[in-house]
Image (cartoon, grey):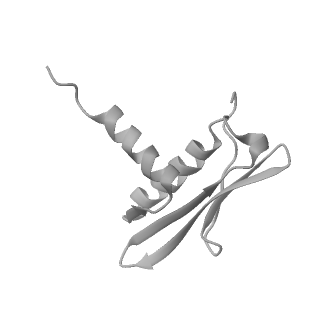
Amino acid sequence: MSEAPTVHHDREGHQFQTVVDGHRAYLAYMDLGKQTLDIYRTFVPNELRGRGIAAVLAEHALAFAEREGYTVIPSCSYVESYLERRQRQEAPADD
């Protein structure tokens, strides 16, 4: 994807969403209180898959959580694997 999509945070609807080429993709979460977010679903329509849109939504949601001091529960399998990949990339290499 050449240009990152614009992501809108719908706080009332508890979603991060974007519309690309007329198709809506979103990441949904629940605020469980006590500064905890449960990210439970990421949806990207077939027409947009493979373009990095889920990663952009996850990054926006995780940046929001970090900025606001939330702990994240990654109930969504995509976000769980995204966090694992990010953690591996940030880990220092063993000598």
The quarter of the displayed image where residue 24 is located: bottom right
The image shows residue 31 at horizontal and vertical percentages of 48, 75
Report the side of 84 relative to 21 (left or right). left
Q: Residue furthest right?
A: 22
Q: Residue at x 65, y 73 (%)?
A: 13
Is 45 drawn above or below residue 31 in the view shown?
Answer: above
Q: How many marks?
A: 0
The quarter of the displayed image where residue 8 is located: bottom right
**Of 36 and 76, the residue lying toward us:** 76
Q: Residue at x 69, y 40 (%)?
A: 49
**Of 41 and 27, the residue lying toward us:** 41
The image shows residue 48 at horizontal and vertical percentages of 74, 41
Q: Residue furthest top?
A: 95
The image shows residue 70 at horizontal and vertical percentages of 38, 65
**Of 66 and 15, the residue lying toward us:** 15
Q: Residue furthest bottom?
A: 33
Q: Residue at x 84, y 42 (%)?
A: 21
The image shows residue 84 at horizontal and vertical percentages of 37, 44
Is 9 drawn above or below residue 95 in the view shown?
Answer: below
Q: Quadrant of the C terminus?
A: top left
Q: Residue at x 68, y 30 (%)?
A: 1
